[in-house]
Amino acid sequence: MTDLPGFWATVFDAALCLMIVILAWRVVFTADLFRAGLTFFAFGLMVAVAWARLQAVDVALAEAAIGAGLTGALFLAAFARRAKPGGEETSEPARAAGEKES
């Protein structure tokens, strides 16, 4: 006789692993940086769920707080600072005060 709760747990774990791999692939190969940042945020949340499924709740909380929350917020803040006030994006790095253009 099949253990149904165990079967569905295995299906959930397989779907979770597949989702993590897909999100990791999309983070690396997405051309739009803002979309990559949001995908990275989702990736961090899925990894936190995976840690929770492995019964490592402390690691899951740290991953959710640092990996998804803090890092995702820093990425989005960096993307917001990267855009010029006119709405155009710049690919040039910011120059320090007093630094001359060569």
Image (cartoon, rainbow, N blue to C red):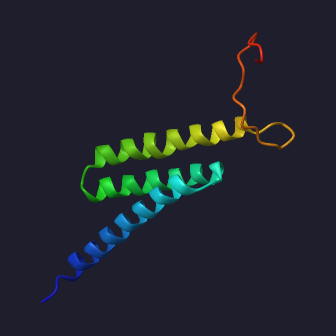
In the rendering, at what x and y percent does residue 50 appear?
A: 33, 57
Which of 12/91 is in front?
Answer: 91
Instruction: Using residue 31 as the reference point, say whether residue 53 is left or right of it.
Output: left
Residue at image position (45%, 56%) is: 24
Compared to residue 31, the image places residue 76 above or below, namely above
Residue at image position (72%, 20%) is: 95
Q: How many marks?
A: 0
Q: Residue 17: which quarter of the image?
A: bottom left
Residue pushed farthest left?
1
Residue at image position (29%, 49%) is: 57
Locate the C terminus by quadrant.
top right
Q: Residue 66: which quarter of the image?
A: top left
In the rendering, at what x and y percent does residue 76 appear?
A: 63, 42
Residue at image position (47%, 59%) is: 25
In the rendering, at what x and y percent does residue 53 appear?
A: 28, 59
Instruction: Using residue 39 as the reference point, say whether residue 52 is left or right of it.
Output: left
Residue pushed farthest bottom?
1
Residue pushed farthest right?
86
Locate the N terminus by quadrant.
bottom left
Instruction: Using residue 2 as the reference point, say whether residue 35 is left or right of it.
Output: right
Instruction: Using residue 51 as the reference point, say whether residue 68 is left or right of it.
Output: right
Compared to residue 29, the image places residue 75 above or below, namely above
Which of 70/18 is in front?
Answer: 18
In the rendering, at what x and y percent does residue 93 appear?
A: 69, 29
